[in-house]
Amino acid sequence: MRNDPFGQGGQQQQQGRARRPGLFGNVRWWILLAFAGYAAYYWFSNQVVDPYTGEKALIDKSLSVEDEKAMGLQAYEEILSQERPVDPNSQIAQQVREIAKRLIAKVDVVEAELAAEHGLQPQRISKDFDWDVNVIESEQANAFCLPGGKMAVYTGLIPVAKNADAVAVVMGHEIAHALLRHGAQRMAQQKVAQIGQMGAGMAGMDAGSQQMVQAAMGYGMLLPYARSHETQADEVGLMLAAAACFDPREAVPLWERMSEASGGQAPPEFSSTHPNPGTRIQNLSALMPKALEYRKKFCTTPPAQ
């Protein structure tokens, strides 16, 4: 017997033979259509064009950059209260801060150059960032940059990166997430998914069918957008590192080492928030000529070795 997503049993099917209300007589379908209409309205009314990528992005217009900064600061303070930042005067902390300083100094020129490639004007949201960077004692080979410019690098990244150029590639990638407002985009995408889940619930779908709707939202929207964000951050971060006089060619061996460090335990790409290492390396290799051009153009005064 065919599964009914609204949990209707055989008795109701018998009754349906006597009187079929039709599509427009079924309140449940009206509820679904209403929620779908609201989701579509929300989606199209909150589209913006990102100057870094030239692509349309979903960002709730009621969420300001200042709101993002406040949330980023709160999250940053919570992380630092729970983790173990190293002494800011230690050699590793000073080296990481110097890398961050060089990357931040090139944010404006990279944004202007990328925006010009797409025929757009830069937005300069970073002018109001309160940049800060800490190094956190941890075995994780990771880093992050929260909205508003609050950054941290985990000590576990250093032996995997092996050199300042590779660390700069990772930090540039994380800075790019903040510049591209990926946190705000994820919040808006999750709201669309919640609208869909609410519609399914109010329309009377059974639990199994609601789970199917949730899975469809995840695999069909949230995960693909998350992978797209990673690819965007790879490109912008690579251009930042190159413009700041770091060697972008270190990106490929870095991600090879990152893949080895993970032990090949990455999930299939379709079910992951990140591209698989092979896809990522392929994309970075394709971007290398452009990155080297950025280095040639913007690395006017290479730092003393």
Image: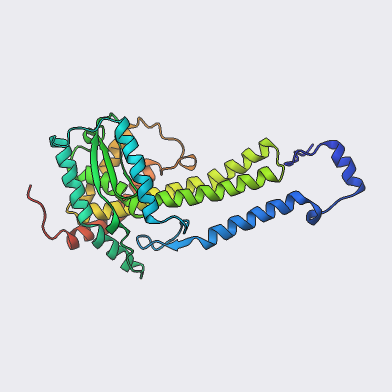
Residue found at x 28% / y 36%: 257
Left or right of 128? Residue 186 is right
The spot of residue 198 in percent (x, y) is: 63, 45
296 up-or-down from 95: above or below: below
Residue found at x 69% / y 45%: 202
| Image quadrant occupied by the N terminus | top right
Left or right of 234? Residue 56 is right
Left or right of 152? Residue 221 is right
**Colour scheme employed for the rendering of this structure:** rainbow
Could you tell me if residue 283 is visible in this image?
no
292 up-or-down from 83: above or below: below
The residue sitting at the right extreme is 18
Residue found at x 36% / y 40%: 75
208 up-or-down from 150: above or below: above
The residue sitting at the left extreme is 304
The spot of residue 175 in percent (x, y) is: 30, 49
| Quarter assignment of residue 114 | bottom left
The spot of residue 56 in percent (x, y) is: 45, 61
Could you tell me if residue 36 is visible in this image?
yes
The spot of residue 214 in percent (x, y) is: 59, 42
Q: Nearer the viewer, residue 135 or 10?
A: 135
Could you tell me how many numbered marks the image carries? 0
Q: Nearer the viewer, residue 210 or 237?
A: 210
Q: Which of 302 and 95 is in front in this view?
A: 95
